[in-house]
Image (cartoon, helix red, strand yellow):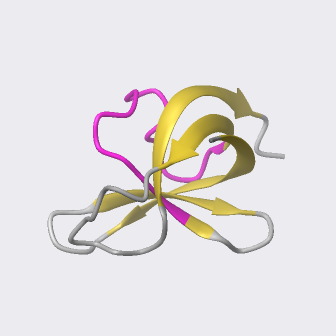
Amino acid sequence: MSITITGKIERRNIGTGAWALVTDEGVTYEILKGADKDLLKAGQKAKINGQVRDDVMTIAMIGPVLEVKSFELLDSN
């Protein structure tokens, strides 16, 4: 099932490192490896359309794994 969520991109120093999207409500999603490099910049806000992958486990285990299908960068102000 596809979801659309908005939040801030964060880099987490767990293991070899992980990228996360933290929503305005405080929910953390781990961004699945292979996401577009333009998205993966700590501190920027983004609106992401993707799919939560229940069939994927990661070493970081910081939240549900989010496979990014598309995204829009938002003004950080």
Q: Residue visible at 73% across and 47% down?
A: 5
Q: For this rendering, which residue is in front, 74 or 28?
A: 28
Q: Residue visible at 62% across and 28% down?
A: 71
Magenta residues, dominant SS class = loop
Say which quarter of the image contains residue 3.
top right
Q: Is residue 15 magenta?
A: no
Say which quarter of the image contains residue 60.
bottom left
Q: In screen coordinates, is 37 left or right of 38? A: left
Q: Residue visible at 50% across and 35% down?
A: 68
Q: For this rendering, which residue is in front, 20 or 65?
A: 65
> Which residue is at the far right?
77
* Residue 35 drawn at (x, y percent): 38, 34
Q: Residue visible at 62% across and 41% down?
A: 1
Q: In screen coordinates, is 1 left or right of 68? A: right
Q: Is residue 33 magenta?
A: yes
Q: For this rendering, which residue is in front, 40 or 48?
A: 48
Tell me if residue 11 comes above or below residue 4 in the rendering.
below
> Which residue is at the far left?
16
Tell me if residue 31 comes above or below residue 72 in the rendering.
below
* Residue 67 drawn at (x, y percent): 45, 41
* Residue 21 drawn at (x, y percent): 56, 56
Task: Say how many tags the image has.
Answer: 0
Provide the residue span drawn in magenta. Answer: 29-45
* Residue 27 drawn at (x, y percent): 66, 71
